[in-house]
Image (spheres, rainbow, N blue to C red):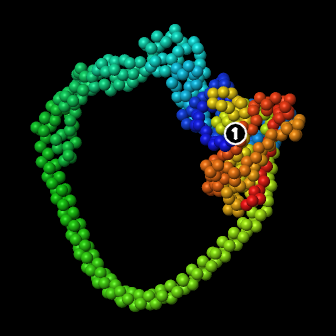
Amino acid sequence: MWEDTKMAAEFACFVKDVPGFPHDVKVTFTSKPDDNLLCGTCQSITQNGCADPNGHLFCNECSLVFTDAGGNFTCPACNWQGKMKEMQQSNPAWGKVSGLYAYCPMKDNTCQYKGKLRETIVHYQQCSDPAKTSCPFCKNRYPKKELGVHIHHYCPSRIVQCRHCQVDMEDHLRQKHEKTCDMRPATCDYCEANLKTFAELRDIHLDRCLQKPRKCVFADFGCPFQGTRQLIEQHMAVVNNHTDLLLKRVIELTRDVQELQKQLNVQSLATTTMDEKFSRQLNQVEGKLECVTNNVAIHTADLQAQKQVQTTQKDVFERLFEEGEKANQSFRAEVLEKFSEVPTEFTHVWKIQPYTHLRDATAASYTKRLSSGKIYTGTPGYCIEFLVDLNGAVAGSTATHVKAMFKIHSGEYDDLMPWPFYSRIVLTLKNHLYPDKNVQFQIVPRDSSPELLECFAKPQPGLSNKAFGISKVISTPLLENESKGFLLGNCVVLTFAIHPDLDL
């Protein structure tokens, strides 16, 4: 009779309203999309859906189901009503969801393509062509007659060898590699000598090249001359002013050393003055510290006397606080006791219409259930969510029966309500033709098994308890037989009544 509502993680869903993309192909994502990016009814992704002012999103197919002949739309989540033209007609979430990563949905699973959803849709339109097949290297699809030519001559991922070093690599990397390969032929820019490899030019020839310009050995001392090795030798043999350059440099260094010595003397004098100043300040601080120590000793005695007085006052305050807390708890218990004596009746009528569409939509969704949303039983009251599974079935079979579940959420009045939740719940499936044949179930939390007591405890703030309910309300064939009266005008009516437990 009781059932938990744990659901398995699924990452595949339909993509609707995309031109050129079929509605009946499921796309698998690398991570689960947020619920606010999906259609609120069928849990599919839509490109050109619409959203009500509260941000509830619907695909085009589901939005038409909830729109009457006059063009008035009623949101099944929040009961907002308005004209279709008042709704946002383009899906504001498409820009975000189209950037999620998804796999190519080829039925034969031969394609391993993965990319952003908008890229995957474009890829699938080419990939789904039966006349094409996948290249084993680049994974792109080509006509079967052209695949051999593509693999041998044009595939950017085919394995080729560098013309210079004979190393294997993918074709799209070869051109860049050959431009920088150490084994490529090279020509000296200075003497125009042709060398077998660039490595020989760089590591050996350039150091020996007679035509490569070089600086004078006295360049660091100010000589600007540059030339080939022969010209440098002639320059060194002819020019005799290098001595003047050396002498000039020595004079500059001597002047720099004298300037640094002056700066050092100034800093040394400043350091000595600073030490004397710090010494005077230290003596002053020590004198003040002695005065402070004496004052601390005097004030310590005063504080001891004040502490004794404060201890006495603290004992009085603690006793008064304890008495006030007991009075407050007594008053609160009295208020809760009087409040619990007031019976609170609550009834929620749920019309499931159009039944067939909602049944099919929930079958394709993650949760497999319809939700009433969070409802308060009163002001104040409990926060409860009602759930209906129109596709209940034994594993491996089609829908056989209808299930009804209940879930208690944390609410703003929890501190005022009696816990555990012991109110009696009465579920009634209405018979439109024969009211005396209504199907009714009663849930009495006080009589439930011990392992389900946590379902009725006070929820943690911001959380909800486990769901509980009726595992089989009615069989699907009996419900959908209109002559039996439970389904009329494609509408099924359930009532949930909550009665206070008078034994509390």
The amino acid beneath tag 1 is Ser
Residue in the picture at 46% in, 18% down: 136
Q: Is residue 107 left or right of residue 242?
A: right
Residue 329 higher or lower than 452, as above or below:
below
- Name the one closer to the observer, 82 or 107: 107
Residue in the picture at 38% in, 25% down: 176
Give the image quarter of residue 324: bottom right
Extreme residue toward the top, this view: 145
Quadrant, the N terminus: top right
Badge count: 1
Residue in the picture at 72% in, 33% down: 401
Task: Confirm whether residue 196 shows in the render.
Answer: yes
- Name the one closer to the observer, 366 or 27: 366
Q: Position of residue 76 (x, y in %)?
A: 76, 41
Dot 1 alpha-carbon crowd within 10 angstroms: few under 14, some 14 to 19, many 20 or more: some
Q: Is residue 238 left or right of residue 498?
A: left
Residue in the picture at 61% in, 39% down: 7
Report the residue marked by disc 1. Answer: 471
Q: Position of residue 347 (x, y in %)?
A: 80, 50
- Name the one closer to the observer, 120 or 251: 120
Quadrant, the C terminus: bottom right
Task: Confirm whether residue 55 shows in the render.
Answer: no
Q: Position of residue 127 (x, y in %)?
A: 57, 20
Give the image quarter of residue 441: top right
- Judged from the image, the secondary structure of the residue bearing numbered disc 1 is strand
Q: Position of residue 236 (x, y in %)?
A: 13, 39
Give the image quarter of residue 283: bottom left
Residue 57 higher or lower than 396, as above or below:
below
